[in-house]
């Protein structure tokens, strides 16, 4: 695997890219709060790196089990202090996944396979056209899982705003929502798990995916609201590959700042 660095960008960001097999890339973002970026005396609280890995985008879809296995391996390395906070970005092959609270009637009725997972939330769908992100980050003490979910929501809302889409939170429901002419719809789902102080799982942002799979289930256990995509809301064809750079930059900035609180 070869490494190369692009020039330092505004705001104290340095990005390193690691090029590996086709369809996979690792971008390492380091954000600093000091104007003296070359000062070796900079404290850990001033400098925090997030490793952002693009595992696979169309046509290199990632099987769910493969992505889940990688999450668990990297999670163990973060717990052991062997790697920095990490964000995995990818498109999955089409799959239904169900959290522990999924009820029987919320599952597909046609016998479609469902993978039971160890995250919060209920059943959802992942597949082509949807950008999935798994932030594997060490949380500050005392652990606040709700605050972690709200942070993810906030970053996604900011990303949507950059496309002139007004995303918002709904009281009592996780994820990011938008208002359509006749209804309210979810545009991004969130489900997480925290083990030994480090998070797993994350978010799914609907970019240009089909909405048909959601008609086979009760998405996230919510029967009184719809689902939409960024492409539908903007009237433009926006693929996960189009959206990924903004997502990577936004999460690197926000979560690296949060990481500084852990190191302080």
Image: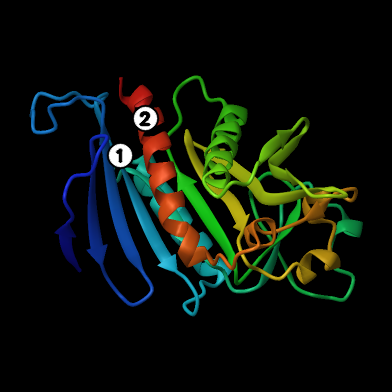
Which percent across, then down, holds residue 192? 60, 43
Q: Which residue is mark 1?
A: 81
Specify whether residue 232 is in view.
yes
Q: Quadrant of residue 217?
A: bottom right
Q: Quadrant of the C terminus?
A: top left
Q: Any mark on residue 257, and which?
A: 2
Q: Quadrant of residue 205?
A: bottom right
Residue ranking furthest to the bottom: 59
Say few, some or many: other residues with alpha carbon within 10 Å of mark 1 (under 14 / 14 to 19 / 20 or more): few
Which percent across, then down, holds residue 222? 84, 48
Q: Is residue 208 left or right of residue 30?
A: right
Pair 1/2: label in front:
2
Eyeballing the image, is 145 above or below 68? above
What residue lies at 73% left-to-right and 57% top-to-bottom?
A: 228
Task: Confirm or deny contact between disc 1 and disc 2 (CB under 8 A).
Answer: no
Which percent across, then down, holds residue 136? 45, 45
What residue lies at 55% left-to-right and 50% top-to-bottom?
A: 163
Q: Secondary structure at mark 2?
A: helix
Instruction: For marks 1 and 2, give the CA distance.
Output: 18 Å
| Precedes in sequence: disc 1 or disc 2 | 1
Eyeballing the image, is 244 above or below 155? below
- Judging depth in this view, the residue of 197 and 58 nearest the camera is 58
Q: Is residue 8 left or right of residue 91?
A: left
Q: Is residue 251 left or right of residue 166?
A: left
Q: Any mark on residue 151, and which?
A: none
Q: Secondary structure at mark 1?
A: loop
Specify whether residue 69 is in view.
no
What residue lies at 51% left-to-right and 53% top-to-bottom?
A: 133
């Amino acid at each position: 695997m070869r490494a190369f660095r692009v020039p330092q960008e505004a705001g104290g960001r340095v990005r390193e890219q690691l090029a590996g097999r086709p369809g996979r890339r690792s971008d390492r973002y380091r954000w600093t709060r000091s104007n003296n970026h070359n000062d070796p005396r900079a404290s850990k609280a001033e400098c925090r790196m997030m490793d952002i890995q693009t595992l696979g985008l169309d046509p290199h879809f990632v099987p769910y089990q493969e992505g889940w296995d990688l999450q668990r391996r990297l999670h163990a390395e973060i717990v052991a202090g062997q790697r920095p906070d990490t964000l995995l970005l990818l498109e999955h092959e089409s799959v239904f996944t169900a959290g522990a609270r999924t009820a029987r009637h919320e599952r597909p009725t046609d016998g479609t396979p469902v993978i039971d997972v160890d995250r919060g939330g209920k059943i959802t769908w992942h597949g082509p056209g949807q950008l999935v992100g798994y932030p594997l980050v060490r949380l500050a003490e005392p652990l606040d899982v709700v605050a972690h979910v709200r942070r993810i929501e906030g970053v996604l809302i900011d990303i949507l705003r950059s496309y002139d889409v007004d995303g918002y939170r709904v009281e009592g429901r996780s994820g990011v929502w938008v208002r359509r002419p006749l209804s309210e719809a979810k545009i991004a789902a969130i489900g997480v798990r925290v083990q030994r102080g480090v998070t797993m799982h994350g978010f799914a942002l609907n970019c240009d995916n089909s909405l048909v799979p959601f008609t086979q289930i009760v998405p996230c256990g919510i029967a009184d609201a719809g689902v939409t995509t960024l492409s539908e809301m903007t009237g433009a064809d926006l693929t996960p590959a189009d959206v990924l750079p903004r997502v990577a930059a936004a999460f690197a900035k926000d979560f690296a700042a949060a990481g500084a609180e852990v190191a302080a």
